[in-house]
Amino acid sequence: MSGLIAVTAVLGSAIPASAASASAAADSVGHATSARALAGTSSSFAFGSRISCGSPNACLAVGSKTSASGNTIATAEAWNGAKWKSVAVKAPKGGYMPILTGVSCKSARSCLVTGSYTAKSSGKALAYSMTWNGTALRPAAKIPIPKRGSLIDLNALYCVTTARCVAFGTMTRSSVKSVILVATWNGKRWAARTAGNPGGARLVVP
């Protein structure tokens, strides 16, 4: 099951085929663009994950970087039509090694961002989200953890409106089994559920 199929399954026919094709093309360009933007940050290695534009002069690129000391840090860059500017990203409370893996903007002042971090208490990799108001990233509602879930990675995100979004990725239930995870956002809170693996596969990487 591809990310687009999962999005269509959750949001119905809200995404026209032409828009989906344009989105896919923009995403391909976005990987290179965000990588160049994030590479300008002070780090030993930077990875640009996703980029989304709410207007021709307002884009947000997200990813992660590894510092010289070996720490993984979530990073974001905002584009104002002329230059890129670094955006402060706070690590989730009680977590470390955060990364940002998804972003979808519906306007210059409205973006939803997803990522993952490692919980200090359990060592599990968990998902989290933030909202962008055009100036700063702020923590959003927690993403619920399906039963027996760990190593959650939501690496694709798309919003039809500010109150209708879907994130898609994987969740590990054991050392030998992972399942597809789909989370939906209604503008205030998340709901998450697992989906069947294609062909009965035990390990999936969307």
Image (cartoon, helix red, strand yellow):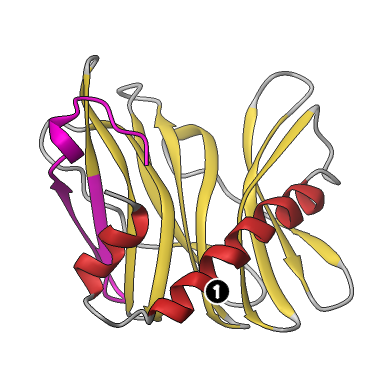
171 up-or-down from 38: above or below: above
Residue 118 x %, y %: 42, 30
Tag 1: Cα neighbours inside 10 Å, few (<14), some, or many (≥20)? few
- Left or right placement of residue 82 versus residue 137 in this view: right
Residue 132 x %, y %: 56, 70
Q: Nearer the viewer, residue 141 or 107?
A: 107
* Badge count: 1
Does the magenta portion include 78? no
Give the position of the C terminus as an image quadrant: top left
- Using the rendered image of the protein, determine whether residue 133 is visible from the camera's viewpoint: yes
Does the magenta portion include 196? yes
* Amino acid found under the numbered disc labelled 1: Ala
Residue 72 x %, y %: 62, 30
148 up-or-down from 92: above or below: above
- Left or right placement of residue 134 versus residue 129 in this view: right
Q: Quadrant of residue 42?
A: top right
- Left or right placement of residue 33 versus residue 30 in this view: right
Q: Residue furthest right?
A: 82
Residue 160 x %, y %: 38, 80
Residue at screen point 39% across, 77% down: 17
Residue at screen point 35% across, 54% down: 3
Label 1: which secondary element: helix
- Left or right placement of residue 45 versus residue 20 in this view: right
Residue at screen point 35% across, 21% down: 123
112 up-or-down from 203: above or below: below
| Segment colored magenta | 181-206
Q: Which residue is mark 1?
A: 22
- Using the rendered image of the protein, determine whether residue 111 is visible from the camera's viewpoint: no
Residue at screen point 12% across, 43% down: 196
